[in-house]
Amino acid sequence: MRIDPAGLPFIGGALIIALVAGTAAGWPAAAPFLVLAGFFAYFFRDPERAIAGAANAVVSPADGRVLVAGPAEPSARPEGDWQQISIFLSPMNVHVNRVPASGRITRVSFQPGRFLPAYHRDAASTNERSEIWIDHGGQSVVARQIVGILARRVVCRARPGMEVRAGDRYGVMKFGSRMDVFVPVNATLQVKVGDLVRAGETVIAVLH
């Protein structure tokens, strides 16, 4: 299985420590670090997905559980009127993020902030986060990577001007986090609070 490049330093570091520990203190001492390397490999796994194909579909950018599905929270939303889908990722979920809608990336921003638990009500507006805006035929879709109490780094590989397709890989979040997606108010939401979603495969909204 493919491993996201962001995980290679973690895996390599754990293996190096295992080698040093095994050489210095015997191979039983290396076992915990080998297990740690295995966890990192599992965490940064990047499985292939069958991407939902409808041109007007907004697909989930992350694996996880839906926390919010409805009118955007006033403290968290970008300027304007939006609907919001928020997804909580546990440390066991795949953390590679995928573009939610096809189009052109018009804006990429990074906002330093706090490290509240990702499920906290104020996490979307106060935690460290990265945000991309996608122009889909004149309609904007916003995807926001949000760090949590454990996930203190986001990797965003998107750049303004890029042409993207729904389901394209564009980044990764490290160790438990949250994704927020904002869609126009006339979009039809396809998920509800509590639903489990899969990046690239679950349609979370339909644009009109």
Image (cartoon, rainbow, N blue to C red):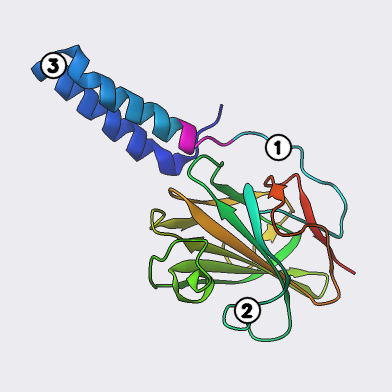
Considering the numbered disc 2 on the image, is that residue within a helix, a strand or a loop?
loop
Disc number placed over residue 77 in the picture, else none: 2
Give me the residue at 78% from left, 75% from top: 184
Q: Quarter holding the N terminus?
A: top right
Q: Which three-letter amino acid code belongs to the residue tagged 3?
A: Thr
* Mark closer to the chain start, 3 or 2: 3
Q: What is the quadrant of residue 106 in the picture? A: bottom right
What whole-number distance in Å separates the C-alpha atoms at marks 3 and 2? 53 Å
Mark 3 vs mark 2, foreground winner is 2
* Mark closer to the chain start, 1 or 2: 1
Question: Neighbour class for label 1 at 10 Å: few (<14), some, many (≥20)?
Answer: few
What's drawn in magenta, residue-wise?
42-46
On the image, the x and y values in percent for residue 73 come to 64, 78
Q: Residue furthest left?
A: 24
**Tags 3 and 2 in contact by the CB under 8 Å rule?**
no
Disc number placed over residue 73 in the picture, else none: none
Q: Which three-letter amino acid code belongs to the residue tagged 1?
A: Arg
* Mark closer to the chain start, 1 or 3: 3
Give me the residue at 32% from left, 32% from top: 12
Question: Neighbour class for label 2 at 10 Å: few (<14), some, many (≥20)?
Answer: some
What whole-number distance in Å separates the C-alpha atoms at marks 1 and 2? 29 Å
Q: What is the quadrant of residue 181 in the picture? A: bottom right
Whether 44 is among the magenta residues is yes
Q: Nearer the viewer, residue 148 or 11?
A: 148
